[in-house]
Each structure stands twice: as structure tokens, then as C-alpha cells.
Amino acid sequence: MRLNWTTLIALALVVSAACGPRSGTPMPPAPASGPAASTAAAAPAAPAAAPTELKVAVPTIDMNYMLPISVAEARGFFQQEGIAQQTVEMSTTASTTALLSKEVDIATHSGAMLAAAQGADARAVFFPYSSSTFQLSVDPKRIKQPRDLVGQALGIASVGNSQDVATRLMVKDLGVDPLSVNYLPMGGESARIAGMVSGQIVGSANNPDVAAELRRQGFTVIANSFKVMAIPWSGYGVNTAMLGERRPTLEAWMRAMIRGIQFVRQDPDTSADIVSQALQIDRDIARESVIALLEVMDPDDPGGATEAGLREWIRVQKEATPEMRDVTIDEVADLSPLRESQRALGIQCKNGYKC
């Protein structure tokens, strides 16, 4: 079973060339002497500008995050927008700290929104999916019915992040008191898969590609988060400084990501091939996962979110973290760069927040 997920790093190649007149071609007559003549020779062409490097932290190198990223890289959208993206795997807790200290440029939306709710300089800015996509997989030998979860350990990414919240909501929806279950913070999906295989945990909530792979290993899906957590998903947030001083770079990154999302809708087969190679996963699993994710990619608002979805995110987080203060959408999210990026691509969003 594959446990390692490949981190992609965008590479940019800048090639310049110069050429002189062909042999035998008559040279133009020498210009007349004088002030104007002294500047008549053409200056050499300026070299192409180096791409802007962006470090993007994701909690797991998985299908949800890497589908638009790998497609945008493979199709050259980042390069065309002058972006060289470095994707790093980092827990939500760690990446939020790094985002606030500007050690990374872009991190998860959930960490950014929680930090913003506490008064930090962060905002969520981009959402590839309109709903959560987790599926709760368990060991059927140990969990034969939902009540068998009582007293058992489920793997979570980190306390309070979206995967943790979704796990508890699915447990509750199964009719089990979430407080009767143990939750073990383990980081990314590769660690949670290893924990399931070793028996350290009885299950975990994962995205569609991992759930499909686990089914082939004998694990069973007993719940999904679609109906219990209909909130913007697998999104990104930034330090508010990037909304000002580096806004053009952010919008260039967004345009590349939007084009990646659009390409997935236009050509899911090629997109499945790209992401299967990027993640080194079975092509059938990639195809199955792409089809599932297309259901939650809004064709009328690529990268955006609805007001209802954002309000639901706040409600869910408030329920999971009672000490969180009451906040408005604009205190935790800023979609204005996205709207500018969409307009630059000729997209007029529909039904999204502040379309």
C-alpha cells in the first residue's frame, strides 16, 4: 500500500537568445552624426522576469488539494502567471503559525479563519470546493456498528481543524456521543493511514481518493460529511499583509488556480491522468475521485463561496469551539481578490458571496 504522497514544486525555465544579422545581408547605411544618431542603436532585449516564488502550505498532499494545483502546474498556468509555487505539507496548527509570521505565503482557510476570529491578521480568500468531502473509514473487524466507536480512537489531523470538526459531526450523525470517542492528532493522511493499518486507530475521516484506496484494503466507509458539513472546503487563507502589498501576486496565483479548476471541468479524464501521476496513485482511483469532486466544484463561482456556506462555517466552528467570539463573514474572509481575478478571466460569478 502506498503511504508516501509526493510534494510538487513548480520549476520555471527562463531561456533567452540573441542573434545578429545573417551573413551576406547588407548593413543599413550608417546614420548621420549628431545627437539623435548617438541613440539610434537598439538596446538589447531585457531578460524575462524571474517568476515570483510562493510557498503554499497544505495539511495533506492529497487529491483535494493537489487536483487544481497539479493541473495548473502541468498545463503551465502558474508559469504563465509568473508564479513558481512550492507546495509543502504542514499541519493546520503549524501552517497558521507560519502564515502569521510570514514564513509561508498561503495556508489553509480553516486555520486562517480561526486565527482571524481571535483577532489575528489573516483571512480566507479561496475555496475550490463548495462542500466538505470527508468519508469516515473504519476497520470492519473492530467496528461492526456505530456504537462500537465508543471508547475507541479515531485519527484526526489536528485538534480544531476542519477534519477534526467533520469527524465529530459524522460521529454525532451516527447516533454516537462524540465525547465518548477518543481522538488522536496524527497530522497528514499518510500518518493516519499508517495508524489504521497498524491498528493504532480504528478509523479516520479522509478525502475521496484515500477512502477509495482504503476500500481496496478492506476498510469500510460508514459516513460522509456532505450532509453534516456543507461548508466551503479545502480552501486557502493569507496574512492580511498579502491583501495589500502583495495583492497582484495573490491575484496571479488565483487566476492560475481558477484556470486549473476550469480545466478539470472541461477535461476530467486528462485531469485524472495528471493528478494520478502527481500523487503516484492508481488511475482508476484518481478518476473516481475527480468525478466525486466535480460534484462540489461550483461552475458558476470557481474558487468562491456562498454567504450561506460561510455562515455555516462560522456556526459549525462556534459549536465546536464555544469560546470563539461571534464574528461576521468579513472579519474572517475577504473574497475581493478572487472577484478581481475572476473578472480578469472574463468570469461573472453567480450566487457567490459579494458576486
Image (spheres, rainbow, N blue to C red):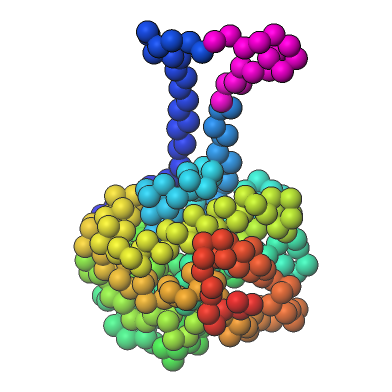
Asked if one can make out residue 19 in the rendered structure from this viewpoint, the answer is yes
> Can you give x and y, in whole percent of width and height, for residue 62 in the image?
40, 58
Position of the N terminus by quadrant:
bottom left
Residue drawn where x is 69% and y is 50% of the image: 246
Q: Nearer the viewer, residue 331 or 100?
A: 331
> Can you give x and y, in whole percent of width and height, for residue 191 in the image?
42, 56
Q: Nearer the viewer, residue 198 or 307?
A: 307
Position of the C terminus by quadrant:
bottom right
In screen coordinates, is 1 left or right of 55?
Answer: left
In screen coordinates, is 270 left or right of 255?
Answer: left
> Can you give x and y, in whole percent of width and height, for residue 170 in the image?
45, 82
Q: Name the main secondary structure of what is drawn in magenta.
A: loop
Please tell me whether residue 160 is drawn above or below residue 11 in the rendered image. Answer: below
Please tell me whether residue 88 is drawn above or below residue 306 in the rendered image. Answer: above
Residue drawn where x is 68% and y is 14% of the image: 37
Q: Nearer the viewer, residue 145 or 208?
A: 208
Residue drawn where x is 57% and y is 46% of the image: 55
Q: Magenta region: which residues? A: 29-45
Asked if one can make out residue 142 in the rendered structure from this viewpoint, the answer is no
Magenta run includes residue 290: no
Residue at the bottom extreme of this rendering: 175
Task: Count numbered badges in the picture.
Answer: 0
Res. 147 image quadrant? bottom left
Magenta run includes residue 33: yes
Residue drawn where x is 53% and y is 75% of the image: 349
> Can you give x and y, in whole percent of width and height, for residue 210 in the image?
33, 64
